[in-house]
Image: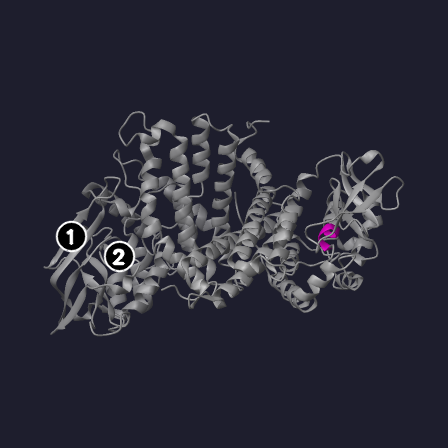
Amino acid sequence: MEKLREEVRAWVAANHPGDPGWKLPQSALEVAEDRQFDWLRDWQRKLYDAGWVGAEWPREYGGGGRERGTQRVIDQELARARAPFLLNLVALSWAGPVILRYGTEAQKRQFIRPLLRCDEIWCQGFSEPGAGSDLASLRTTAVRTGDAWQIDGHKVWTTLGRYADWCILLARTDPAGVKHAGISYFLAPMKVPGVEVQPLVKMTGEGGFNQVIWSGARIPADALLGREGQGWELATATLQFERGAAEGSAGGSGGGAEQVERVAALARASGRDADPVVRDRLAGFWIREAALRANAQRARIPGLVSDRPEALPLMQKLTASELTQDLSDFACELEGDAAGLWIGDRGAIENAEWQRTYMNSFAMTIAGGTSEILRNILGERALGLPKTR
Amino acid sequence: MNLHLRYEEEHALLRAEARRWLDERFPISRVRALAESESGEDPADWKELAALGWLGLVVPEKHGGAGLGAVHLAVLMEETGRRLLPSPLLPSTLAALALSLEGSEAQRARWLPAIASGEARVVFANGTSVWGAERADALIAPERAGLDVIEARAAGLRIEPEIVLDRTRRSARVTRGGGVPLGATAPSDRLVAWACVALAAEMAGGADALLAMTAAYAATREQFGKPIGSFQAVKHPLVNVLIGVESLRSLVYAAASALDAESPDAETLARMAKAQACDVYVFAASRAVQLHGGFGFTLDCDAHLYLKRAQTTRPAFGDAMQQRRWLSERLMGTTGPR
């Protein structure tokens, strides 16, 4: 692994794309302009061609077939080098792993390589205006007519929707069936008549976030993943990937460990580093960051999780997203009056990066199960408490 | 900072053995009976702890101990903390660590074999209030040049049992002639790191026991026709305890692994674990009392036993505020206010 680490490090040093000369988005959730999209797609393609994307996925479908642990080393090195993020987020981290686990041979052969190489972009069609935390109350329908499914409904929170070729789509196939049992899971084409993508604007003013109106869109019969009515099970598996509770991402989840050091530098720059209150809070954040990393390591040691194996995987997204939110809020407070300045103002600190991080952090405390829903799930699965409702 | 958690089969075996023995020997009814007793302990337990090899767990093999590392120590402390072990294993272990890390060759040769065999009661002392001092044969205190070993029969030494909050862990007021407290200097950084891991592990065990007890109660106690654990106002605070406890266990084993690997980050991680332990144990105890409702407030509910242990253990080797102060200096440099 150390040899691999050196190899990746040398490759990134030689191939880092540098600064594009315009503002890069912070994550795939904010990609809204064509030049951003093109630049990031080219970067992922280059990484794939070098063998750094899908390194552990099966060779026969386009992966690297390498041993377990390889991808983690690659991701860590990419994060260390502050390399740009991987564009095809939904595909690499949740659609792909779900197709590998539940897809037919034909589906794996069709979809895996193009999604790893960024030749085909994926989005997610789960949430609806009336079905957020209560996802199983979704009302989008799929009606079988001849050799096609006809889709009607309204989906929101569609990251990369504007650019997507495919969508992991939840729709109700049995309107009479019980709430969860009537749902099916589709690998639906986006570039067909009857699919309209409308941009939504986030509180930062950024786009990248869409709603999709499906009106009589016809998708092929073989777009079904798994069995008819198996959608809820597959959706649950997808959400586990999305929350980081299951291993198997094709890359891009290296994470930065040096956030607290950046805030410490900010405290110094703003002349508040001698304030014992500021120092106490900084130390508290440092502990939370270390705990997050220690949790990630302990989760991989069976003997140290046997008392409560469900807890650490389910905690991952919850604790990481809340730390980012609290820490970026603290950074904004340290900025003083500059916290009121926005991107482009010459007085803005780091071009208002912390303000942007703070506001964007709510995407992670809401998407893929809100922090409140995750606390319910943790209470029920890790502590054996009775269901809420 | 690099983390390399290490946990092998041998650690799992020690845990299984410790848990089995402690579960069998220390049901809460016996812990309560010992807490109410005059001395607070049973000499038969001490003999058993010696026979199991746990009094000498960290004592080097050449001095008659098992010579095991920090991960082993964390495992044993976590399991004893779960059961509120009413026996001075912890202050004895701190004394053994102090001697092993800082003692002179003569001090080690004289005292470590006796500690490991259970033949001599030796406890660590820093300040006036000393755990396990009442029945000790000797006390170990940090001094400018190494360690001071004070025999309990030494002239001018006064050992006076204190009236304590946590009756499962007894302490005594120890002073020398002229009212001088033991321990003229702060313990060494290495000893602090080991002590923080031992204490944080014990506190993790206690907090985890509180969590299990409270979750089980919330799953069965009914109000408004439902188990109270189905209400989010009960469920979410318990999950916050869970997150705290799980993070604490991770920090404890990260710190213990770092000590065993002699990593330069060991003291930082150990102090992080102790800071987390102080906050989490007290939080777990307060939620346990609160969520047990009216029953939680009574002497019959076990929650207060742990709450008292948490409050008593918090200041040892630095509470959360003191640990964070040290950590902030590590993070920011020593430019803070004096």
Please name the amino acid that badge 1 sits on.
Val
Q: Which residues are magenta?
A: B89-93
Please name the residue that numbered disc 1 is placed on: A197
Label 1 to label 2, Cα distance in Å?
A: 20 Å
Residue B32: x %, y % from top left:
69, 62
Number of numbered discs overlaid on the protein picture: 2
The x, y position of residue A254, in whole percent, is 40, 48
Q: Is residue A240 left or right of residue A344?
A: right
Question: Which residue is more in the foreground, B27 or B259?
Answer: B27
Please check the rendered image and state whether residue B91 is part of the magenta-colored stretch, yes or no.
yes
B60, above or below B30, in the image: above
The mark nearer the N terminus, 1 or 2, is 2
Q: Amino acid at mark 2?
A: Leu
Coloration mode? one colour
Q: Who is closer to the viewer here, A191 or B55?
A: B55
Host chain of mark 2: A
Rendered view: B133 above or below A56: above
Residue B21, picture quadrant: bottom right
Q: Residue A191's image quarter?
A: bottom left
The chain ID associated with circle 1 is: A
What secondary structure prevails in the magenta region? helix
Q: Position of residue A101 (x, y in %)?
A: 33, 67
Which circle marks residue A115 in the picture? 2
- Choose between A278 and A3: the one closer to the eye: A278
Q: Residues within 10 Å of mark 2 (few under 14, many from 20)?
A: many
